[in-house]
Structures are given as structure tokens and as C-alpha cells.
């Protein structure tokens, strides 16, 4: 798993980088430029039809080739190949690799993949042949942590050849980029690509929805909320393998009836939820969407409901956790932001917060919301509540923090010290515990340490991750990574492993210290 040496870069290394590139985004260009700096030759291969893209591409093969060529003006050692587009049919990596292996005999062949591909890499078509032809060059992608245990399994059990890139990829989503085009937003694409999109009228599939927002009197603020909800929903859909097109449509239409007068059919409902039920009818009658999952998602995005579909759960979570929301509330509200939670757990946490908020205002909780909360609350907890004589008031026994999320018995201070001790045994530098109790709802403790280089940053984090998982059954809620720092969120405790210069820049001790809440280990 070592980073390649300069000799390989100059003389013997060819890297293949494939994808739909539908459209080409800044994230693609950044990866290609990084590959160009590390390999003797980079071959970019847009697919005719990716096996991972249900429904195929939106832009033609020629459009995507032109977008790539327009964005690659600086690449002296970059070849853009039409091999898969000319070949047509499903683009299996094994066929492409065999083709270029013949062209570059005697060269060391690499195949660039994103870290989101690692989990199912061994299931790729003809993987046993493929793994003998290439070394997989793995680029970290936001939200998809490169787990040490997964790497070991691929190396040992499946005998794959792997190298971890010394850079991370930018955040990028082709689905969201196509939504951006409908909103006339092009900040995720190179300017030359945006010009092609506009000139050729590409990516208009969501325009019939967006262009009608004005007909429903949606304010600028409401449209901005809808866009942020789509953004969040697309991320969750990719993370949880949901139908992204259905998720986008539901998110675009979820507040379509928010600012128009409700018809009499829904006037018996509480005023704050009328728009959701009316909106589902608008989606069906006006826009012509008949899919049960889309309509259900719109109808229940405010109240929740028992037995929601995956699309409905994602919209329910996305609407509540989009980036413009104010989370100065109960900790369980913030916990629900964690995309890595199982969907049912996130739905339950949001429902708990909603019910508490409604009750604190002295209002009545809608019956469907009560039913949803009971449905998504673990049955053992419901029985315990009823045995205590608390009736249906499920939120009284909800609680917050690590115990509810990870089902383990380690209390917060002990967990923070456990992490610190694990780091100490691996010679981490300047280990510091910051007690945040009463200071923020982000977490109860920060554990901060330094590392000498980016490899050590990753190694220390992965070691903590592995020990907590194997010995204590604790899995992180979120992982944010960069070559200079890792931040791993365990609910009530967040671990920060940083290079010294990065640590000085962020200076968490200065930001959060009051002189009494700092503890140094070792």
C-alpha cells in the first residue's frame, strides 16, 4: 500500500480512470490533474453505459468526450479515449483493462477508483482476472472512509493489489450537477463544460419542475431550502443505495404547495402539515408523477409515518437536516444529521425531537407522527416505557448520546480516556482531552493529538477505529478526512488527529478552553 516512487512515475506507470463523466465536474478535473502529476501517462475513459448507472447517461458519448477535451487543456500526458463509447454496450472494467494492457505491454498498469467502490470491489465482473492485471489506485472520497479492515480483507482474502492515493478527491455528484443545470447553477463544472451544457441544452430533465416554481408562488427563501434539501437527499441516496432520480423528484416537489392556498380536501389537517398532503396531489395531478414512493415521500416528509419507503425516509431526514437548518435544540436533533446512521435510527431521532418540540409548545402531536415514533422506536424500549406506566410518551425514555447510537456501555468520559490511551500506546504526540460539557451540542469531549506525517495521521485514526470496533463494538457516526487531518465522530466524543501545522492553524484548545477543561495525556 505504499505510495509509488518517482521512478515509476517517470518511466513505467500508466493509470486508467473511467466513469460516466455525465457531466464533467471540477471534482473529475482535480483527480485527473493529480493523477497526471503522479503517473507517466493517464488515460481517461468515459463509459458508453456504466454498469453502476441505472438508466444510462443523459448526455451523448460525443457530448461527454467534448466536455472532457474542453476541460483538459493543461494535460500534457493525458489521453482521452473513446474506446468504450465506440465499443458500445455495458462498459465492464475488465474489457477496458485488457484492451489497454495490450497497448501498453511492459508498463505497470493502475486503475483509479474512488473509496466508495472499495466495499464491492471484489464483486466486479471477472474480478479474479482483473485483479491480476492492475493495481487499484484508491482515491479517498468525502463520506467514504478507507477502513483499514476493508483494505486488509481485499489484500489478504481477495488478493487484490492496492495503493492508497496521497490525495483526496473533492466532493462531487453527477446527479446534483444535473439538478444544478435546472437551477442555472454551474459552479461545480469548469466554465468550458458549462458553456457546452448551455449551448447544447443538456441536462433539462428536472427543468419542467424548477421552471414552475414561480407558478406556485415559491419565495426565493423557499426555493433555496428546496435546493439544499435536494443536495442533502442526493448525498443520503448515494450513501444508502436508493433510487436517486426518485429522491430528487420528491425533494424538488416536497414543498411545492407550501405557499399556495390549500384546497378544502385538506383543511381538516393541522395547518403546518397541509402542504405535504396537498403537495403529493399536486405532484400526481399537475406534474404527472404516479410512483408510490415519490408521492409517499412528499406526503409524509413533515409528519413521518410507519413503514416508510427508503425514498420517504431519505426525504424526511434531508428536509430536517439540510444545511440551512438551525440546530440550536436538543442533542438528538444534531445526532440526526449524521448521514452514516441507519435510516431508521435517524428517523426515530428526528421524530423524538419533533414530538418534544411540539409538546414543549403546548400543542397536540399529530396522530400519524405518534404512530411513526412508536413504529421506529425499538420494541424493547416501548415495552419498558409502558411497564413504567408512561403510556405512549415515548420521548420521555429517549435520552441522547453514544449509548443510544452505538448500543455500547462506555460512558462519555471513559470513552474519551479510552481513545486517549489507545493513541498513547501508538506514540501519538501531545494528546489532549477537552471537556465540552455545557459548552456546545456538537459533542461532550474532543480528543486531539498530533502526528508527524499524513501516513501517521491515517494510521493512528484507523488503529483507534479498529480497536473500538473490535473490543467495544463502537462504530463512528461520521468520518471527515483530509491528508493533513482526520476527524472521527463517535457521538459524544470526536477524535481529531492532525499534523502539527494543521493543529496550530485550527487551535481547538484555544477555541474551546476555559482553563479548567483541558487534560493532557503522557
Image (tube, rainbow, N blue to C red):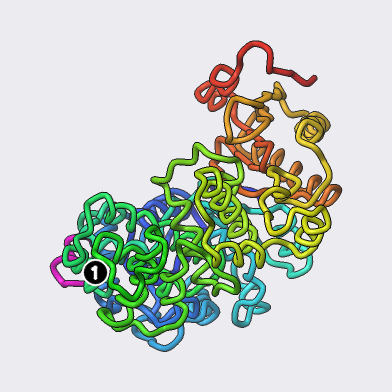
Stretch of the chain drawn in magenta: 194-202
Instruction: Please state the horizontal and vertical placement of residue 148, each as a whole percent of the image.
Output: 71, 52
The residue that disc 1 covers is 66
The answer to whether residue 55 is above or below residue 389 is below
Image quarter of the C terminus: top right
- Residue plotted at (81% across, 57% down): 384
| Side of 179 relative to 128 (left or right) | left
Q: Please indicate, yes or no, whether residue 4 appears anywhere in the rendered image.
A: no
Residue found at the very far left of the displayed protein: 199
- Residue plotted at (61% across, 67% down): 371
Residue found at the very far right of the displayed protein: 471
Instruction: Please state the horizontal and vertical placement of residue 448, each as a whole percent of the image.
Output: 66, 28
| Element at label 1 | helix
Q: Alpha-carbon neighbours of circle 1 within 10 Å: few (<14), some, or many (≥20)?
A: some
In which quarter of the view is residue 420 placed?
A: top right
The answer to whether residue 4 is above or below residue 118 is above
Q: Main secondary structure of the magenta part?
A: helix
| Side of 122 relative to 390 (left or right) | left
- Residue plotted at (27% across, 75% down): 205
- Residue plotted at (84% across, 45% down): 409
130 or 187, which lies in front? 187
Q: Please indicate, yes or no, whether residue 221 appears anywhere in the rendered image.
A: yes
481 or 47, which lies in front? 481
Residue found at the very far top of the displayed protein: 515
Asked if residue 377 is among those painted magenta in the image, a careful observer would answer no
In which quarter of the view is residue 155 placed?
A: bottom right
Amino acid at each position: 500500500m505504499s505510495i509509488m516512487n518517482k521512478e515509476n512515475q517517470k518511466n513505467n506507470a500508466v493509470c486508467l480512470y473511467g466513469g460516466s463523466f455525465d457531466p464533467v465536474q471540477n471534482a473529475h478535473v482535480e483527480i485527473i490533474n493529480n493523477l497526471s502529476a503522479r503517473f507517466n501517462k493517464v488515460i481517461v475513459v468515459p463509459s458508453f453505459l456504466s454498469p453502476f448507472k441505472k438508466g444510462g447517461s443523459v448526455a451523448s458519448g460525443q457530448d461527454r468526450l467534448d466536455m472532457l477535451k474542453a476541460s483538459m487543456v493543461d494535460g500534457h500526458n493525458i489521453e482521452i479515449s473513446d474506446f468504450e463509447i465506440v465499443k458500445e454496450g455495458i462498459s465492464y472494467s475488465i474489457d477496458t483493462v485488457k484492451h489497454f494492457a495490450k497497448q501498453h505491454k511492459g508498463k505497470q498498469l493502475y486503475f483509479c477508483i474512488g473509496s466508495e467502490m472499495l466495499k464491492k470491489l471484489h464483486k466486479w465482473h471477472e474480478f479474479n482476472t482483473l485483479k491480476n492485471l492492475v493495481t487499484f489506485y484508491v482515491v479517498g472520497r468525502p463520506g467514504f472512509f478507507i477502513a483499514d479492515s476493508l483494505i486488509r480483507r481485499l489484500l489478504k482474502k481477495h488478493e487484490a493489489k492496492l495503493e492508497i492515493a496521497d490525495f483526496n478527491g473533492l466532493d462531487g455528484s453527477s446527479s446534483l450537477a444535473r439538478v444544478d443545470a435546472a437551477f442555472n447553477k454551474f459552479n461545480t463544472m469548469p466554465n468550458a463544460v458549462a458553456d457546452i451544457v448551455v449551448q447544447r441544452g443538456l441536462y433539462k430533465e428536472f427543468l419542467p419542475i424548477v421552471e414552475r416554481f414561480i407558478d406556485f408562488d415559491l419565495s426565493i427563501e423557499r426555493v433555496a431550502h428546496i435546493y439544499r434539501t435536494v443536495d442533502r437527499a442526493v448525498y443520503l441516496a448515494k450513501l444508502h443505495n436508493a433510487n436517486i432520480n426518485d429522491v430528487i423528484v420528491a425533494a424538488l416537489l416536497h414543498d411545492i404547495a407550501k405557499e399556495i392556498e390549500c384546497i378544502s380536501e385538506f383543511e381538516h389537517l393541522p395547518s403546518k402539515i397541509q402542504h405535504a398532503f396537498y403537495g403529493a396531489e399536486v405532484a400526481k395531478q399537475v406534474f404527472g408523477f404516479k410512483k408510490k414512493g415519490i408521492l409517499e415521500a412528499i406526503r409524509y416528509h413533515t409528519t413521518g409515518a410507519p413503514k416508510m419507503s427508503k425514498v420517504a425516509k431519505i426525504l424526511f431526514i434531508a428536509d430536517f437536516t439540510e444545511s440551512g437548518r438551525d440546530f440550536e435544540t436538543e442533542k438528538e436533533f444534531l445526532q440526526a444529521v449524521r448521514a452514516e446512521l441507519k435510516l431508521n435510527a435517524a428517523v426515530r431521532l428526528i421524530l423524538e425531537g419533533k414530538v418534544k418540540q411540539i409538546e414543549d409548545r403546548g400543542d397536540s402531536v399529530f396522530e400519524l407522527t405518534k404512530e411513526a415514533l412508536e413504529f421506529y422506536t425499538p420494541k424493547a424500549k416501548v415495552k419498558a416505557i409502558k411497564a413504567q406506566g408512561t403510556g405512549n410518551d415515548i420521548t420521555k425514555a429517549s435520552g441522547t448520546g453514544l449509548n443510544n447510537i452505538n448500543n455500547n456501555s462506555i460512558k462519555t468520559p471513559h470513552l474519551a480516556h479510552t481513545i486517549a490511551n489507545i493513541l498513547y500506546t501508538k506514540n501519538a504526540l501531545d494528546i489532549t482531552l477537552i471537556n465540552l460539557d455545557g459548552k456546545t451540542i456538537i459533542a461532550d469531549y474532543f480528543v486531539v493529538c498530533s502526528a508527524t506525517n499524513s501516513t501517521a495521521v491515517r494510521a493512528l485514526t484507523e488503529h483507534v477505529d479498529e480497536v473500538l470496533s473490535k473490543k467495544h463494538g463502537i462504530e463512528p457516526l461520521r468520518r471527515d478526512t483530509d491528508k493533513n487531518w482526520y476527524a472521527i465522530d463517535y457521538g459524544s466524543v470526536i477524535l481529531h488527529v492532525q499534523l502539527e501545522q494543521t493543529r496550530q492553524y485550527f487551535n481547538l484548545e484555544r477555541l474551546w478552553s476555559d482553563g479548567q477543561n483541558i487534560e493532557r495525556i503522557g
